[in-house]
Amino acid sequence: MKKHREELQCLRATKMIPAFIDGELSYRELEQFMEHMDECDSCKEELSIQFLVEVGLNSLEAGNTFDLQEELNIALEEAERKVRIYHFLRRSLFVLECIGIAAALILALLVVLNLAG
Ligand SMILES: [Zn+2]
């Protein structure tokens, strides 16, 4: 029996699947989506099915041979790379903010010292 919170997460994750396949999730959404796919087998299965329908049928119609597992792996790897870049940028931004705050403090200190002197 699943907890209510988990069910809500599954509901959100399955709603995100079409946008994931279309590559329309924001980095933040992608991060949450991938986290959930890592720990939830039923949503991952749902992703496989929708991926097969969306990408697989299009591919077959175009006359291409299609390896679902391989295509899905590529899509997931791509998503993981995006999430890693997102983490990296967010960390960088945090560091920059810290530097900015430190610089502002030093500046304020200099102003105060100047006024005092
Ligand atoms: Zn789930």
Image (cartoon, grey):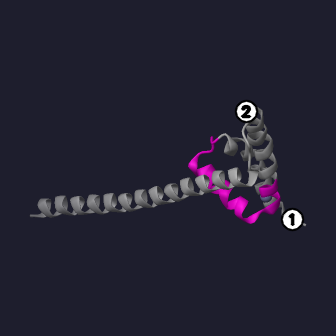
For label 1, the residue is 2
Q: Quadrant of ligand 1?
A: bottom right
Q: Is residue 32 magenta?
A: yes
Mark 1 residue CB less than 8 A from any atom of ligand 1: no
What residue lies at 69% left-to-right and 50% top-to-bottom? Answer: 71
- The overriding secondary structure of the stretch rendered in magenta is helix
- Residue 27 in percent (x, y) is at 57, 50
Q: Is residue 107 magenta?
A: no
Residue 76 is labelled as none
Residue 62 is labelled as 2
Q: Dot 1 lies on which element?
A: loop
- Residue 13 in percent (x, y) is at 74, 52
The residue carrying pointer 1 sits among few (fewer than 14), some (14 to 19) or many (20 or more) residues within 10 Å by Cα, namely: few
Q: Reading the chain from its start, which is encountered first: label 2 or label 1?
A: 1
Q: Quadrant of the C terminus?
A: bottom left
Going by the numbered disc 1, the residue's amino acid type is Lys
* Extent of the magenta region: 23-45
- Between 111 and 72, the one lying in front of the other is 72
Q: How many marks?
A: 2
The residue carrying pointer 2 sits among few (fewer than 14), some (14 to 19) or many (20 or more) residues within 10 Å by Cα, namely: few
Q: Which is in the foreground here, disc 2 or disc 1?
A: 2
State yes or no: discs 2 and 1 in contact (Cβ < 8 Å): no
Going by the numbered disc 2, the residue's amino acid type is Ala
- Residue 51 in percent (x, y) is at 76, 46
